[in-house]
Image (tube, rainbow, N blue to C red):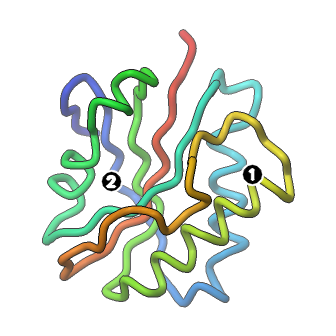
Amino acid sequence: METYRGVEITDSYFTGHPSMIFSTLVRSISAICRFDRSVYLYYIGVASGYDYYSALARRIDQKKLEYQTTRMNLIYQSSSERHTRQLEANLVDHFQYIKADDRVWNSTGGGGGRRGSGPRFYLYLATSHAF
């Protein structure tokens, strides 16, 4: 695990078609954000680039630092921006509205960010931990 601006960046991820991987990602996010794991805020987002590290490092902006983000969990990689954005929107909907988890701080409901340039697209989970 590497660190950028004091935020850890993980390097393990899933791949696959959104219809096949969605439930796996729900379980993964649920495990990472269990209430006994001291995660008090989390954000689901998309990054793009040639490699995961530089793509996720560019997404560590002032807002994430203000929300005291401590880890950027890489959770999905694809060559399809459409699939990655579809998963982002579905996951945000799932956690904000179906599970009604008020710790999710996505403001646009998923898919609100600027379009990426690729060639790879990454779905990440930014988490803030209370230590």
Specify the quadrant of the image occupied by residue 102.
Answer: top right
- From this view, report whether residue 60 is shown above or below residue 15: above
**Direction from residue 10 to residue 107 in the image, left or right:** right
Q: Closest to the observer: 131 or 66?
A: 66
Residue shown at 65% from the left, 59% from the top: 92
x and y, in percent, of residue 108 in the image: 56, 56
- The amino acid sitting under disc 2 is Asp
Specify the quadrant of the image occupied by residue 39.
Answer: top right
**Direction from residue 29 to residue 68 in the image, left or right:** left
Secondary structure beneath label 1 = helix
Within 10 Å of disc 1 (Cα), the crowding (few <14, some 14-19, many 20+) is some
Residue shown at 48% from the left, 71% from the top: 14
Within 10 Å of disc 2 (Cα), the crowding (few <14, some 14-19, many 20+) is some
**Direction from residue 5 to residue 84 in the image, left or right:** right
Residue shown at 25% from the left, 23% from the top: 6
x and y, in percent, of residue 17 in the image: 54, 90
Which mark is first along the chain, 2 or 1?
A: 2
Q: Nearer the viewer, mark 1 or mark 2?
A: 1
Which dot marks residue 96?
Answer: 1
Q: In this figure, which residue is indicated by the disc labeled 2?
A: 11
Q: Closest to the observer: 85 or 75?
A: 85
Residue shown at 17% from the left, 69% from the top: 49
Residue at the far top: name it: 131
Q: CA distance from mark 1 to mark 2?
A: 25 Å
x and y, in percent, of residue 131 in the image: 54, 9
Q: Closest to the observer: 89 or 19?
A: 89
| Count of marks, rendered view | 2
Specify the quadrant of the image occupied by residue 57.
Answer: top left
Secondary structure beneath label 2 = loop
Query: What quarter of the picture does the N terminus occupy?
Result: top left
Which dot marks residue 27?
Answer: none
- The amino acid sitting under disc 1 is Gln
